[in-house]
């Protein structure tokens, strides 16, 4: 292995039933560098890390670590840790009810009795050296998320890690906290720790990383030096589109409905998850929220649906002021919402496919008017055929379906409610190409029939084909709105990247 | 036909039914006449059926009704309500109070019952509020009424164990003249039909399960999560009121200390034996009812074997452990893997394994 | 969502440590108990001023203290054990029969008690930790089994007649200097029973385990966040198994202490003790959800529970039902206070409490 290389992964392949998560992916990590691993959803970065840390066994390929002559075979997260590969996850894997010192030292080594004085002293040293603003005796829950993350990093570092993997560490941090985290990362870098930084925040990548590896659809797109890769190029590589590839796309002409009352309007709408924003959509219009993952698109539409606690703003449906504070209110006004995370927010896993499909419509119909089995079956059947949902029967529990089919079932659920305004958050994620097209056609058909649709997708061309207006978001802020001729790949990517920002 | 059979074999109710069947066979082996029914004349001069089957069905009436309510609470709130015995005592005390202050006629009995229902619903709402609004664990929240409930009943009774005498109550507690089956069995049947109607003509089943399985998703579909949990506790309150009334009518008095003592434990057991998960979600009321009858059948079987009543508990415990161990996911997986190995089928990744290796969400 | 807790101390300034949840709840419990007792002494005087009555709380409830310690251990790790009362009863009966009918020695009876407790803890621990069956059901079955076995061992209550044992039972330790004046005016020194010493030793031992041993700290980790504990390298199953084993052992000890106090085996011994133990742990600041709890709090929980009963009697509410009603009220109070305080701490501000309450009242118009 080359002198500077600390970790080398070659031709890694990993497949799950029905999905090829990784295909011949290479990854090289140099000593003392901060290396970004980027890719949209389904790109495979999570799987790559899980293979590296022993959560999943790889199907084929080799992993080499500096200082070990032959290839390593990581069988469990524990083993990875012993080899010097530590991970700090987004959901911090620490115990909030224990103190900082305890979290750093628990579960390590062979000791019978706890020497509080000793571990507190050692912890204070570690905290000082890494400049972490916490006290050794502080209960972890009283530390901010940023500090908790730093404590997790401190633990990893204290365990002599050579490779530190940070999985989306900045998602819940504000600017100051990110700055603190970065200075910690630079300190570690100076000590020779190599860091794999998984994130989707573009600005941060350009601020702190030395090199980038981009994955797309389970394959390696390339490995680049930050200074050689302008932002716009990075985005195009992540999305798989060349800058000047505009020919085959049809923009949907904007219907000039500007004079009519919007179906839905929000003024200064804010929730616990998003800052105040304005929004409106007309009848039969399809609009999109675009931007990279994590830019705040889902939070905005959840606020529209009343899914998060609303903290301010007014909302109008068809011109009348209404109060939408919970999902049922939104449903009553004909709004439907397909959530981004189908597992957590979408499927009711033990219930059957049929029950999942009719659920929303059933709630709208009322507690005392259940559908007869025949009615429910008819509804479910109709959509199973329409969307091509593959299921053994209507009574199969929905958890047995593949991810894509689950997604279709949830989509069916909301289509069944005949909404006047339908919000689709990543409806095509995890769905086969053929059905992706079907769904886009469906969206256009709905629009023709007068339904307003908000369509969120990480695939730009999907949005370009269906939307007549695009709201661009980056790092939790709305940075632009594009319509008509402005809606081109290039324009979008420039807006996401931030035109004023220098390339690289 | 084969399809229906297959579906039945996989359903939740198969294990409890199988256990019940085993019990029946066991008894028949021991004593072929165990399940014989005889026609006799009882003390009041009525012609009635009697026999072990009748004892089982009769004795388990209160438990079966409570098991139904407990199933709903477990399904929606993912925990257990340990105060049902106390709630029944409170409701029973109210029932007796109203009866004692009036001439006992049918309208009075009805009024007494309604009063006891109202009180029971209130106590259910108390528990429900602690669980749904204050988000306290059901077992902890109901610990309060468990501790204080029977004493509240005692206080309602004016610090005594009052009796009630009336042939009308005898109709409820033992037999209606002319009908050879004990009335409590009939009450269970009627209640069962009522609940079945409710489940059929409302969305109680669907919403309760949705809330228990995935609260967040249920909410995003417009379901009132707090409301459903409250409702389940209030229904359990009604069950407690009915059970209390039956028990009082049987015995003719109310003793706050002993009325349906420890029945909460039996109710939870019935729910578990019935194949329901104690952490909520999908439920089968039929399973819980079968579970209730299994518990009673077990007790009667043990009595028939001359086991002293105080030692019955030990045997009950063993049977419960066996049933629960056999339904545990790890054992099930082990058995499935053995079966696959024996039939040389490739092993499938089970749900259990998938949950260990982490979510497949971020592929 | 950004946190509103800014960065901590500037170098050189000593900031007061924000108290941990465990310690906060403990402080509340201790303060409540002390206040309660002081108020009792002031308002009702009489018995409360008698040191013997205070010591009698210990004498009469030593066994409860022991089993509550076991329950605290299990609850900290996120589990529950409702078999403790049953095991206690079984141990009392088994030991009496052993001593009287089989001519056993006192040492042997102690071994028997420990053995029974460990056996229960072992089986329950395996079924719960390694077969992953719900603890409620397993320990409920355990309770049934123990209670049933008690009557199988002896159908009738038995009083121990074994000489050595009876001598042990009557052994008293006098506390010099404090005492009360009897009717004839002579000074009766306050005394405590042997069981109390055992109970206090147990409390101390559990305190050491929880605070200073690896196993004890693992309990907190497992109860705090099971998944994280796994990722931190803790053997979660083994930790859980040992928590149930310990609880069983302590139930065995508790049973023997009970026997030392009453001298008799009886199937109705320690009825409802498990719920009282749970209540004591909760009052003492142990959360059923796990990760929070301490044994000193549990000790004070027992004391509070029982002092409260004494207060209720002293205040003239003599009817037996007042006991449980007021205990229930006290429980209600503590549970609500705990949930409110913890919710507040998570949100970080008092003013957030107000909107929540208002919304409670006017749900419809929210």
Image: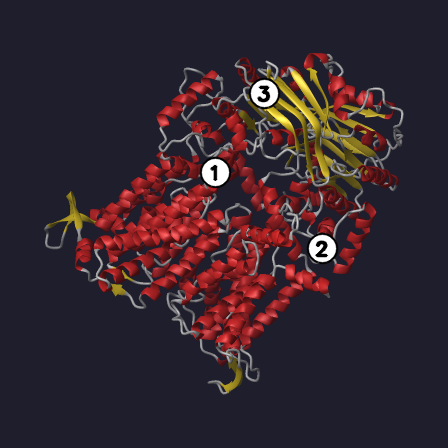
Residue of label 1: C224
Q: Rounded to the nearest whole Å, what is the CA distance between mark 1 and mark 3?
A: 29 Å
Residue A395: mark: 2
Disc 3 secondary structure class? strand
Disc 2 secondary structure class? loop
Picture coordinates of residue C44 (x, y %)? 27, 49
Name which residue lies at 46% across and 54% down: C138
Q: Earlier in the sequence, mark 2 or mark 3?
A: 3
Task: Mark 2 vs mark 1: give the one in front.
Answer: 2
Q: Is residue B323 left or right of residue C323?
A: right
Quadrant where the image shows the C terminus of chain C: top right
Q: Say above or below: A464 vs A400.
A: above
Picture coordinates of residue A187 (x, y %)? 53, 15
Q: Is residue C74 visible?
A: no
Name which residue lies at 66% across and 41% down: A343
Quadrant where the image shows the N terminus of chain C: top right
Picture coordinates of residue C204 (x, y %)? 30, 40
Picture coordinates of residue B329 (x, y %)? 56, 51
Q: Nearer the viewer, residue A376 or A67?
A: A67
Residue of label 3: A195
Task: Mark 2 vs mark 3: give the one in front.
Answer: 3
Coloration of the structure image: secondary structure
Disc 1 secondary structure class? helix
Q: Nearer the viewer, residue A481 or A441?
A: A441
């Amino acid at each position: 292995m080359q002198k500077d290389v600390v970790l080398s992964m070659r031709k890694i392949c990993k497949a799950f039933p029905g999905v090829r998560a990784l295909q011949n992916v290479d990854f090289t990590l140099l000593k003392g560098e901060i290396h970004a691993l980027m890719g949209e959803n389904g790109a495979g970065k999570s799987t790559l890390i899980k293979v590296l840390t022993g959560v999943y066994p790889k199907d084929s390929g080799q992993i080499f670590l500096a200082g070990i002559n032959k290839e390593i075979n990581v069988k469990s997260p524990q083993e990875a840790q012993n080899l010097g590969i530590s991970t700090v996850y987004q959901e911090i894997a620490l115990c909030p009810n224990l103190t900082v010192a305890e979290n750093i030292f628990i579960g390590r080594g062979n000791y019978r009795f706890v020497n509080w004085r000793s571990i507190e002293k050692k912890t204070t040293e570690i905290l000082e050296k890494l400049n972490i603003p916490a006290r050794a005796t502080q209960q972890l829950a009283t530390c901010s998320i940023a500090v908790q993350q730093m404590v997790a990093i401190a633990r990893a570092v204290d365990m002599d890690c050579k490779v530190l993997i940070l999985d989306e560490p900045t998602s819940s941090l504000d600017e100051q906290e990110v700055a603190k985290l970065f200075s910690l990362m630079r300190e570690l870098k100076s000590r020779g720790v190599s860091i794999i930084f998984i994130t989707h925040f573009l600005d941060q990548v350009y601020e702190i990383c030395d090199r980038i590896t981009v994955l797309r659809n389970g394959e390696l797109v390339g490995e680049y030096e930050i200074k050689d890769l302008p932002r716009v190029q990075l985005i195009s590589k992540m999305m798989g589109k060349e800058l000047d590839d505009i020919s085959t796309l049809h923009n949907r002409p904007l219907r000039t409905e500007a004079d009519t009352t919007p179906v839905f309007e929000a003024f200064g709408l804010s929730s616990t998850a998003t800052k105040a924003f304005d929004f409106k959509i007309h009848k039969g219009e399809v609009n999109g929220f675009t931007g990279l993952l994590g830019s705040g698109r889902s939070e905005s539409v959840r606020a529209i649906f009343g899914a998060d606690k609303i903290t301010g703003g007014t909302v109008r449906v068809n011109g009348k002021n209404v109060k939408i504070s919970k999902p049922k209110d939104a449903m009553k006004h004909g709004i439907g919402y397909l959530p981004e995370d189908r597992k957590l927010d979408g499927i009711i896993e033990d219930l059957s496919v049929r029950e999942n499909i009719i659920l929303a419509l059933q709630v709208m119909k009322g507690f005392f008017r259940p559908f007869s089995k025949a009615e429910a079956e008819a509804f479910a059947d109709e959509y199973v055929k329409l969307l091509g949902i593959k299921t053994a029967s209507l009574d199969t529990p929905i958890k047995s379906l593949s991810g894509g089919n689950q997604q279709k079932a949830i989509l069916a659920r909301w289509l069944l409610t005949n909404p006047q305004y339908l919000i689709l958050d990543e409806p095509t994620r995890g769905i086969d190409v053929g059905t992706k097209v079907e769904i886009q056609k469906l969206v256009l058909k709905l629009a023709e029939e007068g339904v307003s649709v908000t369509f969120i997708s990480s695939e730009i061309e999907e949005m370009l084909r269906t939307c007549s207006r695009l709201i661009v978001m980056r790092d939790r802020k709305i940075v632009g709105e594009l319509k008509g001729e402005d809606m081109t790949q290039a324009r979008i990517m420039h807006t996401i990247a931030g035109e004023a920002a220098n390339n690289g | 036909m084969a399809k229906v059979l297959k579906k039945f074999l996989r359903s939740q109710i198969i294990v409890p039914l199988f256990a019940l069947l085993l019990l029946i066979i066991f008894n028949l082996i021991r004593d072929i006449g165990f399940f014989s029914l005889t026609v006799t004349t009882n003390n009041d001069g009525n012609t009635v059926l009697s026999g072990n089957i009748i004892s089982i069905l009769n004795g388990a009436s209160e438990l079966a009704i409570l098991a139904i309510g407990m199933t709903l609470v477990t399904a929606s709130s993912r925990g257990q309500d340990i105060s049902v015995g106390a709630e029944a005592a409170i409701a029973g005390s109210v029932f007796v109070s109203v009866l004692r202050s009036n001439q006992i006629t049918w309208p009075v009995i009805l009024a007494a019952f309604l009063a006891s229902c109202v009180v029971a619903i209130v106590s259910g709402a108390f528990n429900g509020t602690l669980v749904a609004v204050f988000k306290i664990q059901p077992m902890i929240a109901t610990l309060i009424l468990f501790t204080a409930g029977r004493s509240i009943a005692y206080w309602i009774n004016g610090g005594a164990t009052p009796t009630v005498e009336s042939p009308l109550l005898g109709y409820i507690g033992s037999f209606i003249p002319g009908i050879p089956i004990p009335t409590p069995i009939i009450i269970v049947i009627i209640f069962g039909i009522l609940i079945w109607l409710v489940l059929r003509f409302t969305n109680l089943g669907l919403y309760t399960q949705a809330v228990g399985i995935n609260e967040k998703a249920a909410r995003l579909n417009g379901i009132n999560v707090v409301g459903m949990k409250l409702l389940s506790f209030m229904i359990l309150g009604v069950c407690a009121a009915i059970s209390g009334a039956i028990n009082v009518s049987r015995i003719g008095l109310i003793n706050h200390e002993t009325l349906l003592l420890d029945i909460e434990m039996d109710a939870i057991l019935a729910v578990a034996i019935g194949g329901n998960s104690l952490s909520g979600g999908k439920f089968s009321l039929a399973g819980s009812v079968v579970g209730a009858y299994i518990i009673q059948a077990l007790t009667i079987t043990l009595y028939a074997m001359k086991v002293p009543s105080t030692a019955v508990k030990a045997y009950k415990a063993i049977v419960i452990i066996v049933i629960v161990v056999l339904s545990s996911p790890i054992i099930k997986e082990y058995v499935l893997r053995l079966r696959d190995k024996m039939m040389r089928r490739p092993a499938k990744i089970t749900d259990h394994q998938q949950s260990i290796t982490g979510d497949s969400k971020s592929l | 969502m950004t946190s509103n807790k800014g960065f901590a101390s500037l170098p050189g300034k000593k900031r007061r440590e924000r108290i941990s949840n465990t310690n906060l709840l403990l402080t509340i419990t201790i303060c409540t108990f002390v206040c309660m007792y002081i108020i009792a002494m002031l308002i009702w005087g009489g018995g409360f001023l008698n040191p013997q009555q205070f010591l009698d709380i210990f004498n009469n409830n030593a066994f409860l203290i022991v089993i509550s310690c076991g329950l605290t251990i299990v609850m900290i790790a996120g589990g529950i054990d409702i078999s403790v009362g049953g095991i206690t009863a079984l141990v009392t009966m088994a030991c009496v029969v052993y001593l009287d009918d089989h001519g056993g020695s006192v040492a042997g009876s102690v071994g028997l008690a420990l053995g029974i407790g460990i056996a229960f803890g072992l089986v329950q621990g395996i079924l719960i930790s390694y077969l992953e069956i719900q603890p409620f059901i397993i320990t409920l079955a355990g309770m049934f089994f123990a209670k049933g076995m008690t009557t199988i061992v002896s159908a009738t209550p038995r009083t121990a007649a074994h000489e050595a044992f009876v001598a042990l039972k009557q052994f008293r330790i006098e506390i010099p200097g404090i005492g009360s004046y009897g009717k004839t005016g002579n000074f009766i020194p306050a005394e405590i029973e042997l069981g109390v010493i055992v109970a206090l030793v147990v409390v101390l031992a559990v305190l050491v385990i929880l605070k200073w041993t690896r196993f004890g700290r693992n309990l907190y980790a497992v109860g705090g966040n099971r998944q994280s504990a796994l990722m931190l390298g803790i053997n979660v199953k083994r930790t859980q198994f040992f928590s149930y084993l310990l609880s069983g052992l302590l139930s065995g000890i508790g049973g023997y202490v009970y026997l030392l106090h009453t001298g008799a085996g009886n199937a109705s011994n320690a009825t409802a003790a498990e719920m009282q133990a749970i209540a004591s742990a909760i009052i003492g600041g142990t959360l059923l959800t796990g990760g929070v709890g301490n044994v000193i709090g549990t000790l004070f929980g027992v004391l509070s529970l029982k002092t409260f009963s004494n207060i209720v009697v002293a205040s003239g509410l003599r009817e037996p039902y007042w006991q449980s009603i007021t205990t229930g009220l006290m429980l209600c109070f503590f549970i609500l206070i705990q949930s409110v305080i913890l919710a507040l701490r998570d949100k970080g501000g008092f003013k957030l409490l107000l909107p929540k309450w208002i919304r409670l009242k006017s749900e419809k118009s929210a």
